[in-house]
Structures are given as C-alpha cells and as structure tokens.
Amino acid sequence: MILAPSILSADFGRLADELQRVERGGAGLVHVDVMDGHFVPNLTLGPPVVKALRRATRLPLDVHLMIEHADRWLDAFIDAGADWVSLHVEAVTHLQRAVAHLKARGVRAGVALNPATPLSALEEILPELDYVLIMSVNPGFGGQSFIPGALDKVRRLAGMLRARALGARIEVDGGVDPGNVRALLDAGAEILVAGSAVFGQGDAEAGARALLAAAA
Ligand code: DX5
Ligand code: ZN
C-alpha cells in the first residue's frame, strides 16, 4: 500500500510542518487537490503552491486536477514540480493528447473517474495509463463519506487490468479510513488517498500510521 495524504485537510498555514509529519508517518506520495470552482464547487490552489510544496518535501507530488481545460495547465503544474498528474475523463475532451503529453514530459499519467462514470470510459485509454484514480466521493470537498459502490468498481477495474495484462495502478480517493483500507487493498487498490483520516485528528503522523497499520 502507498499512502497518499491529501493536503486539502492539512493546516494551510503550516504546510511544510504537515509534510514532515506525514513523511515520518510513512506516506509514499503527497496528494494535491487542484479545484477551479467550475468542474467542482470549490477553489483550492495552483502552481505556486505546488512549487512551494516541492521545496518542502522529498516525497513525489501527486497532483489531482479537478479543473476544466486541464490540458492547458499541464506544463505549469509539471514545471512547478508535479510528479504524478491525474486528469478527469469528464473534464478533458482530448484526453489521449493530454495523457501523451504527460508521458512525454516524464511524469506519471493518471485518469480519474467520478463515482457515476463507468469503467467503460477507460476502455481505449487504459493501455496508456500509469494509474487510474477511482473517486469514492463526488470530488470537491474533504470529509465526505465513502460511497460503497466504489469497492466493487475497484474490483472490476482490477479484473479488467488483469484480463488485458495491463500495468496501470489503482488509486482510490475519498472517505478512506482505517475501516475500509483492508477491503480496498483486497479489491486491488494500491494507492490510497486520505485527507481527513490523516489530518483530521490533529496529529498527522499518527493519522498516517493508523491507516498503514490497518493495511497490515
Ligand atoms: C475530494 C478530493 C480528495 C479529498 C479526500 O474532492 O479529491 O482528495 O481531499 O478527502 P477525505 O479523505 O477527507 O475524503
Ligand atoms: Zn483528490
């Protein structure tokens, strides 16, 4: 299991400290939620914050773009220090071009699916992906409840990948907590994003450790 704490639930006044805490807690990636107030009903951060995060941690930055016209912003986020970049299939018209661009720039390319978007939307692009981000909440906010149907979606995606002998990894985002970690890993997820479960209790190091312990 790779734990990817989502800084959306961190203390934005002390981001560098929060990153140190999750590093000590065993995080493998830092999940960065970019929202534009159009694709999702919330606004968060842009490339200057990614650049500051890049200087504050050695962990790879996993940038989740919940924005319209994401293809116009890829270079800005990569130049700022993104290592993994995911795009929503619902928000990018020329998805293959955007994925090919990410790969040409040497970053890991991912595609994200909202809860109501079927796996069939991945059929053509799947061989080109480094990872698939299955949303287990409707994107926009931290602290929402896990949508139970996501578990079977992960299982079916793992089956599709096996049947086609493809190597994309499965990331799950939304409502991940110590109570569902084990089931998600058993279903085939490998990268688990967690915001409130890591940062919500006030001690991000302990929050990260509790999630990793739940995987054991
Ligand atoms: C939701 C974001 C998530 C969010 C997860 O739109 O994409 O990454 O931060 O937060 P929790 O873990 O609190 O559901
Ligand atoms: Zn996210």
Image (spheres, rainbow, N blue to C red):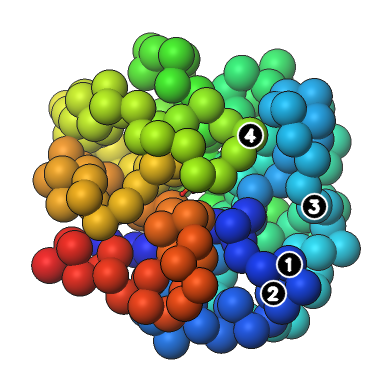
Q: Position of residue 7 (x, y in %)?
A: 61, 61
Q: Position of residue 76 (x, y in %)?
A: 84, 53
Which residue type does callout 3 highlight?
Leu
How far apart are labels 2 and 4 at the CA level?
A: 20 Å
Residue visible at 59% across and 57% down in the picture: 9
Q: Position of residue 127 (x, y in %)?
A: 40, 32
Task: Give whichever of 200, 42 is nearer the camera.
Answer: 200
Q: Which residue is mark 2?
A: 15
Which residue type does callout 4 highlight?
Gly
**Disc number lying in front (3 or 4):** 4
Q: Which residue is mark 1?
A: 12
Residue visible at 80% across and 69% down in the picture: 51
- Residue 184, can we see it? yes
Does the residue tagged 4 have its C-beta within 8 Å of any atom of ligand 1?
yes
Q: Secondary structure at mark 4?
A: loop
Residue visible at 50% across and 55% down in the picture: 195
Q: Which residue is mark 3?
A: 45
> Do residues under tags 1 and 2 come within 8 Å of each other at their CB atoms?
yes
How far apart are labels 1 and 2 at the CA level?
A: 5 Å
> How many numbered circles are shown?
4
Does the residue tagged 2 have its C-beta within 8 Å of any atom of ligand 1?
no
Q: Earlier in the sequence, mark 2 or mark 3?
A: 2
Q: Position of residue 84 (x, y in %)?
A: 57, 55
Which residue type does callout 1 highlight?
Phe
Q: Which residue is mark 4?
A: 140
Q: Quadrant of residue 162?
A: top left
Residue visible at 21% across and 50% down in the picture: 179
**Quick one: label 4, few (<14), some, or many (20+) residues within 10 Å?**
some
Does the residue tagged 1 have its C-beta within 8 Å of any atom of ligand 1?
no
